[in-house]
Image (cartoon, helix red, strand yellow):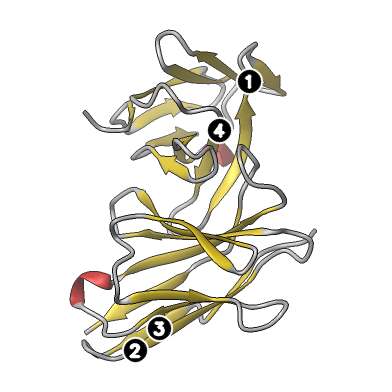
C-alpha cells in the first residue's frame, strides 16, 4: 500500500539552528500539506502546497518557515531559526485531489529544540 | 468559540460495549467531514469519511447534522484494538485544509 514517508523520525537541534524535515508524498498525489502537533495538543494545519506553490498557510507558518519541492518526489519543510516552542511532531500529508479529499499522513518527525 | 469541539474524554469501556463520540464545528462553510484515529505518538489514520446521509462501515457508524453542525461516531461491539484517540476533522473555508478537533481518547478494557 502506498504511503507517505518522512525523515528523520526524530530530529534534535539547538535553538537558533536551521532544520529541514523531509517528506516523500504518495506518488500520484498532487496536494501536499504540513501539520504540527505539540505534545498533548491537537493537530494544527501549517501549510498546503499545490502546483509548486503554497496554496494556503496558517498564522503559525511565519517567515521562519518555508516549504519546497526540490525534485519530483521530495517535499520539505524548513525552519530557519528554531525556537523552543517549535518542539513538536511534524506530520506531512498528501492527497490525490484538493477540496474534500482524504489526506494520508506520514509517521511524522519529532522535532526537539534544546 | 473553538472551531471543532469534541467530548473531553477519556472514555473507558469494557470489551463489547457500544460507545458514541460527539463533535461540533463552528464553521458553517465546512464541506467535508472525517473521523481519524490516532494511536499514541503515531500519525492520524483515516477511520471513515462522514456523509450527509450517514454511513456505516462494519462496527462504525457516522452521522452528520449540517443544521446543528454536529457529527457523531458510534462504535459497536468495541474491541481492545479500538483503543486510540478519535479525531473529528472538518475542512476549512477553502474546502481543502483540515481542521482537527482535540480528540477523544478511548480505552477498551478486557
Q: Dot 1, crowdedness within 10 Å: few (<14), some or many (≥20)?
A: some
Q: Secondary structure at mark 4?
A: strand
Where does label 3 land, which residue? A11
**Marks 2 and 4 belong to one chain:** no
According to the picture, the residue beneath numbered tag 1 turns out to be B51
Distance from disc 2 to disc 3, alpha carbons, whole Å, reads 11 Å
**Image point 64% across, 43% down: which residue?**
A102
Q: Which mark is residue B97?
A: none
Q: Residues under labels 2 and 4: Cα distance? A: 35 Å
Pointer 4 local density, CA inside 10 Å: few below 14, some 14–19, many at least 20 = many
**Whether residue A13 is situated above or below residue B52 in the rendered picture:** below
Quadrant of the image occupied by residue A111: bottom left
Indicate which disc, 1 or 4, sits on the residue closer to the N terminus.
4
**Within 10 Å of the Cα at label 3, are there few (<14), some (14-19), or many (20+) other Cα atoms?**
some
Q: Dividing the picture into quarters, in which one does residue A12 lie?
A: bottom left
- Say if mark 1 contacts mark 3, CB within 8 Å: no
Q: Are marks 2 and 3 in contact (CB under 8 Å)?
A: no
Q: Which mark is residue A18?
A: 2
Parent chain of label 2: A
Query: Which residue lies at the image location 47% right of the left edge and 19% below the top edge?
Result: B71
Label 3's element? strand
Residue highlighted by disc 4 = B34
Secondary structure of the residue carrying tag 2 is: loop
Q: Quadrant of the N terminus of chain B?
A: top left
Amino acid at each position: 500500500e502506498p504511503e507517505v514517508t518522512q525523515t528523520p523520525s526524530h530530529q534534535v537541534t539547538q535553538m537558533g539552528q536551521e532544520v529541514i524535515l523531509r517528506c516523500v508524498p504518495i506518488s500520484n498525489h498532487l496536494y501536499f500539506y504540513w501539520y504540527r502537533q505539540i505534545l498533548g495538543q491537537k493537530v494544527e494545519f501549517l501549510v498546503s502546497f499545490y502546483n509548486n506553490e503554497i496554496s494556503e498557510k496558517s498564522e503559525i507558518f511565519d517567515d521562519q518557515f518555508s516549504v519546497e519541492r526540490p525534485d519530483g518526489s521530495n517535499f520539505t519543510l524548513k525552519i530557519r531559526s528554531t525556537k523552543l516552542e517549535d518542539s513538536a511532531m511534524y506530520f506531512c500529508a498528501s492527497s490525490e485531489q484538493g477540496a474534500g479529499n482524504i489526506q494520508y499522513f506520514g509517521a511524522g518527525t519529532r522535532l526537539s529544540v534544546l | 468559540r473553538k472551531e471543532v469541539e469534541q467530548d473531553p474524554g477519556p472514555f473507558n469501556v469494557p470489551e463489547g460495549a457500544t460507545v458514541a463520540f460527539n463533535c461540533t464545528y463552528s464553521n458553517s462553510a465546512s464541506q467535508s467531514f472525517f473521523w481519524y484515529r490516532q494511536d499514541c505518538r503515531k500519525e492520524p489514520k483515516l477511520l471513515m469519511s462522514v456523509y450527509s446521509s450517514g454511513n456505516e462501515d462494519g462496527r462504525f457508524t457516522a452521522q452528520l447534522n449540517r443544521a446543528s453542525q454536529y457529527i457523531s461516531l458510534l462504535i459497536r461491539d468495541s474491541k481492545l484494538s479500538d483503543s486510540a484517540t478519535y479525531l473529528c476533522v472538518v475542512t476549512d473555508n477553502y474546502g481543502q485544509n483540515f481542521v482537527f478537533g482535540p480528540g477523544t481518547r478511548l480505552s477498551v478494557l478486557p
